[in-house]
Image (cartoon, coloured by chain):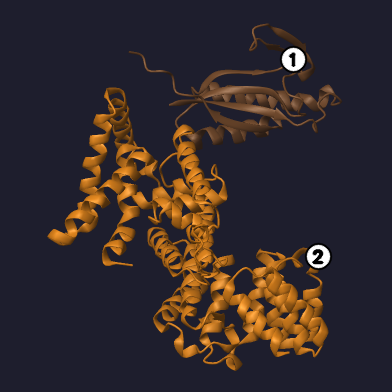
């Protein structure tokens, strides 16, 4: 078993802001159903949706003095919207969950394995 | 190629695949196989080739791999052991998929959709074909360091992302086999239409560059791997179709380049064609027709079967060729298929009708040498000399293959 992060990325072309609650409701329900499936399959580790990218603050303490700036670290229009962390036997299984997750949240999903945990001596 | 090299190339995939299953690690599998080959190079010339070279190499490679696992310490050994146990536990029919063959699993691992298509081909050639990184770099016209990096990165992704080492379940097979067939077809085409490969080593050393019109070894490797895939998936029509397509194309190879100049189908000496390959290809095409589940490789094979059926070019059944292109165009409405279809139209309805079809493709194909060459030929047949010369010049400018270039130049100069 390995852990994978299934992250949902927005590229600025989606317009969730102007969608009405009636339009968003089916997406929320589909994501709820998907979350339950992941939990019932025993694959759930953690998941969450993030507040809009405007809520981000970046801290840089790499040069000896902490610099706090308003906004995301990257200027790109792509940003992370939310993610699932799941347990999965291999990439094929993770890709299968990602397919269903992508359909549920109506967004593209990136699949990345976590590094293995360091050995315990 | 020496006998030893032939044995190595034939057995390489089998040994790597067996070790990959046992140790669950492509790097260990590949390095142990290389070490076993080194031992064979020392011993076989002295003691003779063992009766079952594949089994001999597998045993030696397994021992080398175990040595390495032990050398690398307890933690890795434990992991390898765990992987081994895990693999053995998974070896029930459902988990291993419809066919349990180590090489087929390795092909599907190398051609996993999570790897970039060009890396799938490179990895397949390296691990199953046993081609060196230098040879693969040569075939793809990239520096050896670039190819080495691509192969290393692909193997790392297989390991880090846990791309499974198995034949997909029956339900996933139709969608996954197409990537495998596409990779094998690219390998074959790279051999058949070698892009005028210049050896980088030679170019760097200042020797005369060597232009190679056909890479026989790549064609043979692609056929061998497709044959293997087909024997392991006996009921898959497109796999058979691809095999027949390769056999019927390869059969014409002896007549295709003479003195470094391409000889087109209509002018080939058909007595040079390989009758055994043609018979085998025709038999497979008949089997495909009986199944009646046509796909793009089967249709291309059927077109090649019609061509290889004619004792000389005047006996070609162009009506049937066109009918097959019509069906192919329905499945694959690409401009390249439309271009090839126009060639058959020219034989049936004359060059003028064909030219209007070809001119309609200029938007998407103007930069493709075969488009310019086809257009040049139609203009030549219509007596439009200046336009034909211009199209030949454009085709020569775009063609990368030396034999093709020589033929186009001769055609242009003969107008």
- Report the front residue among B66 and B343: B66
Rendering coords of residue B237 (x, y %): 49, 64
The tint chain A carries is: brown
Label 1 environment density (alpha carbons within 10 Å; few <14, some 14–19, many ≥20): few
Q: Secondary structure at mark 1?
A: loop
Rendering coords of residue B376 (x, y %): 74, 80
Rendering coords of residue B17 (x, y %): 34, 48
Residue found at x 49% / y 50%? B144
Which residue is disc 1 drawn over? A56
Q: Is residue B132 visible?
A: yes
Q: Are marks 1 and 2 in contact (CB under 8 Å)?
A: no
Rendering coords of residue A37 (x, y %): 56, 25
CA distance separating discs 1 and 2: 47 Å
Q: Is residue B369 above or below residue B68?
A: below
In this view, the residue farthest toward the top is: A65
Chain letter of disc 1 in the image: A
Give a yes or no on whether discs 1 and 2 share a subunit.
no
Chain letter for the part of the structure drawn in orange: B
């Amino acid at each position: 078993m390995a852990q994978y992060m299934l992250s949902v990325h927005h590229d600025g072309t989606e317009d969730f802001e102007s969608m009405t609650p009636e339009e968003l409701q089916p997406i929320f329900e589909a994501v709820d159903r998907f979350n339950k499936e992941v939990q019932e399959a025993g694959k759930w580790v953690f998941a969450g949706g993030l507040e809009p990218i405007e809520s981000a603050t970046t801290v840089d303490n790499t040069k000896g003095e902490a610099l706090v700036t308003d906004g995301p670290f990257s200027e790109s229009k792509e940003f992370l919207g939310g993610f699932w962390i799941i347990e999965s036997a291999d990439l094929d299984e993770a890709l299968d969950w990602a397919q269903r997750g992508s359909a549920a949240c109506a967004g593209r999903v990136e699949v990345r394995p976590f590094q293995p945990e360091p050995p315990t001596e | 190629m020496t006998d030893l090299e032939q044995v190595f190339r034939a057995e390489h995939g089998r040994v790597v695949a067996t070790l990959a299953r046992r140790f669950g690690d492509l790097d260990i599998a590949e390095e142990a196989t290389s070490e076993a080959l080194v031992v064979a190079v020392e011993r076989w010339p002295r003691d003779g080739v063992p009766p079952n070279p594949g089994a001999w190499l597998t045993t030696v490679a397994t021992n080398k791999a175990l040595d390495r696992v032990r050398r690398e310490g307890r933690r890795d050994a434990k992991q390898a052991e765990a992987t081994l146990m895990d693999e053995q536990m998974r070896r029930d029919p459902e988990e291993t998929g419809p066919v349990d063959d180590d090489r087929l699993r390795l092909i599907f691992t190398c051609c996993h959709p999570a790897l970039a298509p060009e890396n799938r081909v490179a990895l397949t050639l390296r691990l199953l074909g046993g081609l060196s990184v230098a040879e693969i770099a040569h075939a793809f016209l990239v520096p050896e360091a670039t190819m080495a990096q691509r192969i290393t990165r692909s193997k790392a992704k297989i390991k880090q992302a846990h791309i499974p080492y198995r034949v997909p379940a029956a339900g996933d097979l139709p969608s996954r086999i197409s990537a495998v067939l596409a990779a094998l077809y690219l390998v074959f085409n790279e051999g058949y239409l070698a892009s005028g490969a210049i050896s980088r080593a030679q170019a760097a050393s200042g020797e005369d560059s060597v232009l190679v019109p056909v890479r026989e070894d790549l064609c043979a490797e692609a056929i061998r791997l497709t044959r293997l895939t087909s024997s392991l998936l006996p009921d898959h029509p497109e796999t058979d179709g691809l095999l027949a397509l390769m056999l019927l194309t390869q059969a014409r190879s002896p007549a295709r380049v003479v003195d470094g100049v391409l000889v087109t189908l209509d002018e080939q000496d058909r007595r040079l064609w390989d009758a055994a390959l043609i018979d085998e290809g025709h038999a497979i095409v008949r089997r495909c027709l009986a199944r009646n589940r046509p796909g793009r490789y089967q249709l291309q094979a059927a077109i090649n079967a019609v061509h290889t059926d004619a004792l000389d070019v005047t006996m070609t059944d162009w009506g049937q060729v066109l009918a097959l292109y019509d069906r192919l165009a329905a499945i694959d409405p690409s401009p390249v298929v439309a271009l090839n279809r126009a060639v058959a139209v020219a034989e049936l309805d004359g060059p003028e009708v064909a030219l209007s079809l070809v001119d309609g493709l200029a938007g998407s194909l103007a930069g493709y040498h075969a488009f310019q060459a086809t257009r040049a030929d139609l203009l030549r047949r219509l007596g439009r000399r200046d336009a034909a010369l211009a199209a030949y010049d454009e085709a020569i400018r775009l063609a990368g293959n030396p034999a093709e270039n020589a033929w186009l130049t001769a055609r242009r100069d003969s107008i």
